Structures are given as C-alpha cells and as structure tokens.
Image (cartoon, helix red, strand yellow):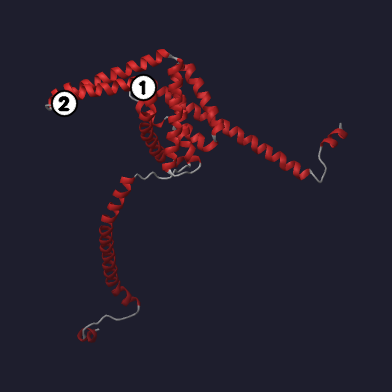
Amino acid sequence: MLRGAAAARPSNTTSGWWWVAEARRGTENTAGARAIAEGALFADLTVIIILLGLYVPYAGPILATISPLPLLLLVLRQGWRISLQASAVAVLLVGFLTGPLSAIAVGVIAVRATSLGIGMRRNWRPAGTIFVGTLFFWACFYTATLGVALLIPSWRTATEEGFKLTYNQASAVLGGLLGLVGFGATWQHTWHPELGRWFDFFIHHWMLLLPAVAFPVLVIGVMAEYVIAEAILPPFGFKPRPLRLPFTGGASTHTAANEAPKQKSEGSAIAQRLSERRERDADNDEPAKSIGTGRQAQVPVEERVER
C-alpha cells in the first residue's frame, strides 16, 4: 500500500507543477459551476417574466419590453453556450407549464437577446450593433415564418385571413375619417380601389414581400431594446456605448451652444457674490485682528486723563 502510494505521488522535481495543475483544475470546475448556476437563475427569471406577462392583467406590454434582458445579461457574462442551454431549459419549462405555443415566445426572446448580445459582447458601436442584431433577428424571423407557412398550409391560410380582416377594418376607419373631412367620394371612387389592387398584390406575394416590410419594423424594435438595455444594464456591471441619433445630436449641440453664455453669466455672478462675501468677512474680522495684535483703540484725551 505504501509503495503504491509513493509511486502514485509525483517526484520532488515535478511536485510544484502537479499542485499548480490541480489548483487550475479546481478553478475551472468552480467557474463552470458558477456559469451553470447563473444560467439556471436567468432561465428562471425569463420563465417568471413570461408567466407574469401571460397571467397578470395589463402587465404584458411592460414585461415584453424587458423580457430579453435576463438572457442578454447572461450572454454578456457567460457567452453563447451557457445562454443556449438556459434558453433550452426555459423553453421546456414554459412548454410544460403553459403549452407548446407559449414556448415559442421563449425562442423569440432568446433571438432578441442574441441580436443585441452579438455587438455588445464585442463592444461594437451602437449603429453596428443595431444593424447586425436586426439582420440576425430578421433572418431568424423570416426563416421561421417561411418554414411554418410551407409546412403548415392551414397556418398560412389563417394568416392571410388575418391580413384581410385587418385591411378591411383599417380601410373602413380610414374611409370614415376621410368622409368627415369631405373626401368620401374621392375615397370610394379613386383611393379605395387603388389601395385594394395593391393589397391584392401583397396578399398573393406576401411571403416574398414580408422581408422588405419587416426589416424597418425590426430596426425600430432593436433600437428601442438597445435604449432600454443602455438604461438598465449599467447597475449590473455592463455599460453599452450611448446611442446618439442624428437629430438628437444636432439638438443637443444647439442647446449646449445656447446654454453656454447663460452658464458663463451665472458663473460670473456667483464668483462676484463670493468675492463680495470674502470682503465683508474680512471687514468683520478686522477689529478682532487689531485686538489680537495688541493695538489700543483710540480713546479721547479727557477719558485717558480721568483714568
């Protein structure tokens, strides 16, 4: 037994490297356990947000805006492998608790988180992050829509019926508003038939026209999520680059140029008040200084004689 243990133990020349290797292996195991624990935590947070959005009245729109943040934070902290595992766990939990259709929402949230995490993890500029994220989101969205439409014809038919119902309701509202302002006849004889021809063309080719229609909408959505992440992520240790839109940059420059003279005048007024206060304090301290230096106050001659 002792001879076998002595043989298993490394020699003195290699004992230092052996302990270093053991310590490194223990550190890697600890890091892996921490990553798995964080993945489970953020997966549970995603599931809780989805369940609250489904069952709490009027909470859906608010929770939908922050739903990608747990997985986005996980992407930034642990990378893609742990995030993929956490997304799969969240999909299974939501599908088991609420049904397979609700589990699709977890996939959409994971794609939204990944679309922002691609650029934020590499510290890209906001424009590049938003563009690449939108392109990734658009590719996943169009691939999933096209695949479902081709594999499930009933879903495609139901989608087209939904488009038609939305068009009929919107055209009725628009026609009523135009009739109130005196353009009812023009709407009925000119604009409505022309709009109907464009809609018929769209409904017959919507699977090809959907990418062009969806991309600008997704750009706005990814940009809004970037702004939300920019406001919420700094307390967690991640500060994305600030998003500066072109029109806001010009407005801020113009505002700063207008406020600069005002701030300068306010600063000069404050400095003048401080200098006046110092002079007043110096005048008040002059008698005390004269007493402290032994100077005698001027007393009339008569009073000094009497003393």
Q: Is 159 drawn above or below residue 35 in the view shown?
A: above
CA gap, disc 1 to disc 2? 29 Å
Q: Position of residue 94 (x, y in %)?
A: 47, 20
Amino acid type, mark 2: Leu
Question: Image quadrant of residue 5?
Answer: top right
Q: Nearer the viewer, residue 251 or 171?
A: 171
- Identify the image quadrant of the N terminus: top right
Q: Is residue 15 left or right of residue 295?
A: right
In front of the other: label 1 or label 2?
A: 1
Residue at disc 2, secondary structure: helix
Residue at the outermost left position: 182
Question: Image quadrant of residue 32?
Answer: top right
Residue at the outermost right position: 3
Q: Is 294 drawn above or below residue 142 in the view shown?
A: below
Q: Position of residue 84 (x, y in %)?
A: 53, 29
Residue at the outermost top position: 154
Q: Residues within 10 Å of mark 2 (few under 14, many from 20)?
A: some
Say which mark, if any, is on residue 178: 2
- Identify the image quadrant of the C terminus: bottom left
Q: Position of residue 291 (x, y in %)?
A: 32, 76
Residue at disc 1, secondary structure: loop
* Location of mark 1 (residue): 205
Q: Nearer the viewer, residue 213 or 173?
A: 213
Q: Residue at x 53, y 28 (%)?
A: 86
Q: Residue at x 40, y 15 (%)?
A: 155
Q: Is residue 210 left or right of residue 85?
A: left
Q: Nearer the viewer, residue 258 or 186?
A: 186
Say which mark, if any, is on residue 87: none
Q: Residue at x 28, y 58 (%)?
A: 260
Amino acid type, mark 1: His
